[in-house]
Amino acid sequence: MPHHLFIEPRDKFNNACIVDSAADPSDDYTVDVVEVSSNRPVPSCFHWESHPETSRIALVLKLDKEGCYEARVSYRGTVLSNGVFHIIVLNKSDAALVQKNVAKKSHYIWYEAKLIAWNCEKVPKPKRVFVYISPKQLTIKEYMLKIIPKRLVTFRLCPSTKFQFKGNNNQAGEPVLVIDDGCQPQVEMVSDERSIIAATFTQYLLKNIGGSETFRDKQEFFYHEVRKLHQKHFHDKLQIKVLRDKILDSSLRATKGLSTGDWCKSFEITFLGEQGLDWGGLRREWFELVCCALFDPENQLFHRFKNDKQGLVHPNPRRPSHLKLKHYEYAGRIVGKCLYESALGSAYRQLVKARFSRSFLAQLIGLRVHYKYFEQDDPDLYVSKIKYILENDVEDMELYFTEEEYTSSGKLLRTTDLIPGGSRIRVDNSNKLQYLDALAQYRLATSVREEVEHFLKGLNELIPDNLLCIFDENELELLMCGTGQYSIADFKANHTVSGFLFELRKVLDWFWTAVSNFTEEEMARLLQFTTGCSQLPPGGFAELNPKFHITTAPTFGNLPTAHTCFNQLCLPDYDSYEQFERALRLSINEGTEGFGMI
């Protein structure tokens, strides 16, 4: 079946060029197609079509033999941007299997493979692994003792995750697949199902970009699976007696020794020394008080990188000695209890009152932490150090792969190698991204590894990680913490604007029209996109620091962009309100993945 790929010619000023119907595109454009397994050229597998009405040229491909091919499209000898790509041709049965995979409501699709290289280094012996694909991510796991799953790496299902295909040049004689997103360790595997894995991933991606995979659908699936998982546990009442002035310690004692079945029961809360009867109100109050005791930075189990009410909370690696790892396990169990209660219906819904850092949420779903998380989690460090290193020459900065920690009085406490032998490895322009990723891995993940592991231990007692992994970190926050309440009047009273007056006035009118029609979920997405968190500080938009800032972008027709460390939303100009609204909705729903569309 022929497949059309479109080229939209543009001049050096990015203006669309006129396509002449009488012109032959092959005079300027060339295409080279080779079979990956044999590296043999494949001639006469394409033709060109001109579409002057849309100012586009179509490359029509038709390959009769199943397999993997590489194509290279050039214009007058220069390879086009995105002009090198792979083509997968499936037989009828494999194509039907891929369509069946994508149409499934269940997200338990997996294939077997052998890991042959990790982070560009060959492994001593090929390792048997399993590749799990869901609508949001691809996870590679191995099984210890054949029964205990261990997650090796998770790649987000987004355009930045790239697949490379190599020939059968390995001992097993099987097709080679390389997966790399530029942030996590590159993975090289061999599998007879390589084409099906890649095609399923690609079809999910195309489906996601089309907007047909919604958070609401996944939330309903999640709730259904949680109810199904615990259907043998009855939601009977269970008396829990606590002290209001010692809410955390007394709650720990009251729930000590409870089984998973007990945690699935309906807690009936009694505050000792008080007369209140629990008809639901005391239970909700208990959840809120316990969440405050666990996640409020003033209690020091979690802390903020940015010391204000807008700062996101992260496990505290320097917590006081009286706070133990069991407190993180309990925190995970409370979050799991909230998610379980929410799965039972709106009458039982419990939200987690917290504003978690993106890197912490990412670790809960198995994503590797990288330097880009600093922009949302630690904006002061991002502006003062990360951004400076990214944009400047570091050859003369005397930086090494180490992290220095100081006391509050400025005395050097310790120096830690970020990688083996880091104190002897100098940072230069060629490895500065590796340094920033190592810094993020140490600050945001390694320093709190035990805390995160114990949190997950408590959380997974009620909610298995394979269900959490169908969400990205932004969706996970929406699932756990909800959307909150948003006032458009508060928003309009507490924002700042800048830009060219004429364009700003028109785009600003369109913005308020669009926002006024947003659902709570879309408002949460807008806040996530612009500020890094779906929830507002306790005082609403007035307590955002810096203020929510709207500015014009010096582009036309592109997607809106954001700078979360400045709470800044940049809006380009458009021909019509319909184009503006479509672009804004696309950005807030898919913009965190980092891509644009023509």
Image: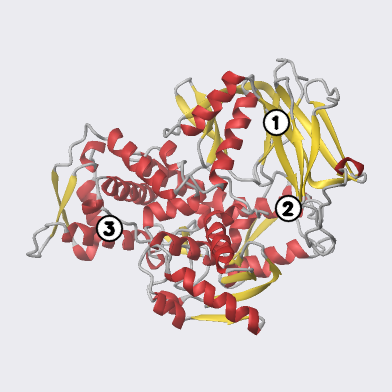
State which quadrant residue 522 falls in.
bottom left
The residue to which callout 3 is attached is: 248
The vertical placement of 103 against 579, above or below, is above
> Label 2 to label 1, Cα distance in Å?
21 Å
Secondary structure of the residue carrying tag 3 is helix
The kind of residue tagged 2 is Glu
State which quadrant residue 280 falls in.
bottom left
Where residue 9 sits in the image (x, y, percent)? 80, 53
Is disc 3 surrounded by few (<14), some (14 to 19) or many (20+) residues within 10 Å? many
The residue under the point 26% across, 56% down is 249
The residue to which callout 1 is attached is: 2
> Is any part of residue 401 visible from this angle?
no
Q: Earlier in the sequence, mark 2 or mark 3?
A: 2
> Label 2 to label 3, Cα distance in Å?
68 Å
Where residue 452 sits in the image (x, y, percent)? 46, 47
Q: Nearer the viewer, residue 474 or 556?
A: 556
Q: Foreground mark, 2 or 1? A: 2
Where residue 469 sits in the image (x, y, percent)? 47, 41
The residue under the point 44% across, 64% down is 523
The residue to which callout 2 is attached is: 53
The kind of residue tagged 1 is Pro
The kind of residue tagged 3 is Leu
Is disc 1 surrounded by few (<14), some (14 to 19) or many (20+) residues within 10 Å? few
State which quadrant residue 14 falls in.
bottom right
